[in-house]
Amino acid sequence: MRPSPHKDLFADQILANLGDDLNYAHEHRSWSPFYSDIGLGFNENAGIAHLFLHYNRKTTTLGSPFFTLPQKPRAVKTTALSVLQLFDYASVAYAFYDHNSWVIECTGLDDIQFHLATTAPISEARRHGAEEPSLYILEGYLPTTDPRDPDLSFPLLVGLRLVCGKQISGDGITTPLRFGPNESGRLVLSFSVQLLDVSHEILRQRLLAAPSTVKEATDLSREWFRRAAGNLVYHAHDPREENILAQAVSILAFNACQAPGFLAGRIAAFPNRGNYPAHFLWDACLTILGLEDMDPRLAEDALLLLTEALRPDGKMAHFLCSTWMRPRDTQPPLVGWAALRLVKQRKNKEFARAVLPALLKNMRWWQTQRMSRYGLFFCPTPLETGWDDTPRMDKGPILAVDMNSYLLLHMRACAELAHIVGDTRIANDLEEQAERFATRLVEMLYDPVENLFQDVLVETGEKLTIKTPACFLPLLVGVPIDEKKARRMIEQTLLDPQRFVGAVPFPSVSYDEETYHPDKWWRGPMWPPVAYFMLEVLRKYGYDHEYRDIAGRLYTVILQDGHFCECFNSQTGAGMGCSQQSWTAALLLHLNKHLQGMGSPFETPLR
């Protein structure tokens, strides 16, 4: 696909490439325009099968179904902006027009019903009084679905407005609300939902602002998608590649979420709506690779949510959601790297000023809470590295090569941000710290015999010989090692087909290790974040041919699987874990940007 001369036209082309047979049947594929924290689910039956509430670490589902129609459709068309259910002599169309708000337009149906009480175990269900007779605001409390949530229940408002047609009977609580068409056969309803942080007046205003047709609502959705796509441009060589790249954009747009509570006021970057409806630390940082060219708010909000939710002592939570955050573990400190990337791209000093104090405070937390007697940072649990069950920690806490590399990267990023905002004293101090730390990293973690960086067991000081991509991260962050040794490390180990560059490059454990397993989570599969940093090592040292070859293989793996999985079997390329994963969509778009002119990846066979 050639880029359109106008970004809005390119966004429209993305929508066209998505087609009219999208899957909204599951919570991780919910239909969620306007950065909604709810999503609609559709299946082969008529109406809305499920209302998904994506406000917390576990999705709450209202169904059975959420909105019923009297018969099964003969055909269904599901696009990014609308859903159309066709019957023999009738049709029902759906489109969002605002956050958590959509319109339903029916023609040819004599009677439809909505009954909130049948959709979920709602307590204290009642109808809120409204001056306008066409408004129906139903409210109550739902039980929380995650035992880690500090609350036992949360409030829910479901608002309806009869835009066109007539009410037949019911109140929606004790008996179903029944509606019929007007004299011309049209029936139009608007719905709006609020959860946790609820306001009857805001809900009322949103319902009153609903358009009178699905076409008008679809036009509003199109404007939202154009803003969400921002200045993003990609290139494709065949229809299938166009479709999958378009899916990557829609995944990032639909996984972006304006939710209440701790997430209020910003747009969160969920890794996945169904399985991971929360804002994770290193997921958000890696998702920047795709978000940076989209709606300008998306990338910055993804980082500001983390810096603004900093614990008073400087710790960043593993993830945060609407009512609680996971403070016990943290994750790789990549916010400084990601923030500097955005500041350089956008030349935004104000953003640098906004994030730098929190980044410095977080650096201090690492220095006081994770500093070992060896002068390097230690990791007490695999979760902290992001590699949840890595064999590197089978013997206990380690001085992790990757985490110490990330922290050096963090120091250098903070120093550069300090220079950008004009704080020379802090910048110079951080640069001196970084040089001392880089020297210490080499002294402790570099093995001159193996010519490799290795993790160290905290308890004994023993170097661990297991080979993983983490072994090469110091090369990316500027440590004092002879360039000839670095190149030999890359050429003899990182680029070795028997270790890291086989059919699916960069397994999380070297192919030749005893602990390697191609599909056992962090013990062998290829993970997109790790693969990205290995590619950056190749770019830094000028291995351009190897970069393009390996990046093309990774690009092909993601395209051929087509589901944007969390990780991939490092022998077959089969997707594993959750689908619709943001960091995989982001990496695909990033690689597309850097691989122009190489021909269709579908013509490059996996080796």
Image (spheres, grey):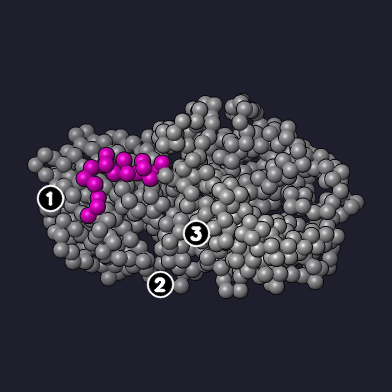
Residue 166, labelled with which disc? 1
Residue drawn at point x = 62 percent, y = 53 percent: 340
Q: Nearer the viewer, mark 2 or mark 3?
A: 3
Q: Quadrant for residue 357, please give it.
A: bottom right
Q: Position of residue 218 (x, y in %)?
A: 31, 41
Residue 152: mark: 2
Amino acid type at image mark 2:
Leu
Tag nearer the camera, 1 or 2: 1
Q: Earlier in the sequence, mark 1 or mark 2?
A: 2
**Kind of residue indicated by mark 1:** Lys
Q: Is residue 78 above or below residue 200?
A: above
Residue denoted by label 3: 278
Dot 2, crowdedness within 10 Å: few (<14), some or many (≥20)? few
First along the sequence among labels 3 and 1: 1
Q: Residue at x 14, y 47 (%)?
A: 165
**Can residue 388 be seen by looking at this rendering?**
no
